[in-house]
Image (spheres, rainbow, N blue to C red):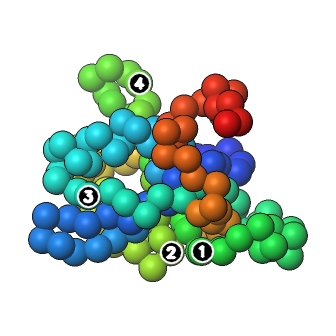
Amino acid sequence: MALSDSQRQLLVRCEITNRDGDPGVRYVEHSLFRLWQYMMANKHGLVVHGLAVCLWLPEQEWQAQGEIFQRAGVVESVHRLSFAIYDRSTGLCNTMQRYVPADDADKVKELLLQRISPEARAEGDFAMELEAGRAVIRDDLVDPSTLGHALSEIRPG
């Protein structure tokens, strides 16, 4: 059983600079971007810049239709990490997804696995899935004031 529904996802691609001046790239779900940006700036001291909207496609869809999507913009290899973690104390399953550059996927996967409690790991109370995909990047479509708002709320200017 797949942890994700393997559908396209609208993301914001952004460049970040940490407190030490080290650069990086993050992919954040469009609907969560404003909250994520606030948390990164205020909790972690990251500077977020270089914004671009992109469409993430599962690798299977890219293989079938990549020739068409490649015309839309720059393409980067981006993986989706999906986690499901069962919490015995509440009887609920928490899920999360992260989109990461393909080159960083193993490192991010290990960092996220470290956050799962030893008990949950020992009991097998979690599942993790890595899904390859591509992000079609459109940096010419960014109006920073609309990022994080529902697409139905965005009115052409």
**Mark 2 or 3 closer to N-term?**
3
Q: Which residue is mark 1?
A: 76
Picture disc at residue 102: 2
Q: Foreground mark, 2 or 3?
A: 3
Instruction: Give the residue drawn at x 64%, y 49%.
Output: 9
Cβ–Cβ under 8 Å for marks 2 and 1: yes
Amino acid type of the residue that numbered disc 3 sits on in the rendered structure? Val
3D distance between C-alphas at marks 2 and 1: 8 Å
Type of amino acid at the residue the image marks with label 2: Ala
Q: CA distance from mark 2 to mark 4?
A: 30 Å
Residue 95 x/y as whole percent? 45, 38
Q: CA distance from mark 2 to mark 3?
A: 22 Å
Earlier residue among tags 2 and 1? 1
- In the rendered image, which quarter contains the C terminus? top right
Q: Which mark is residue 47?
A: 3
Tag shown at residue 92 = 4
First-in-chain label (3 vs 4)? 3
In this rendering, the label closer to the viewer, 2 or 4: 2
SS of the residue under disc 1: strand
Asked whether 88 or 100 is in front, the reply is: 100
Residue 124 drawn at (x, y percent): 37, 48
Task: Tell me whether circle 2 and circle 3 mark residues in contact (CB < 8 Å).
Answer: no
Q: Are marks 3 and 4 in contact (CB under 8 Å)?
A: no
**Vertical relation: 128 (above or below) 155:** below
Compared to residue 152, the image places residue 127 above or below, namely below
Q: Describe residue 134's horizontal placement relative to residue 52 as left or right.
A: right
Determine whether label 2 and label 4 are within 8 Å by CB: no
Position of residue 18 relative to residue 106, above or below, is above
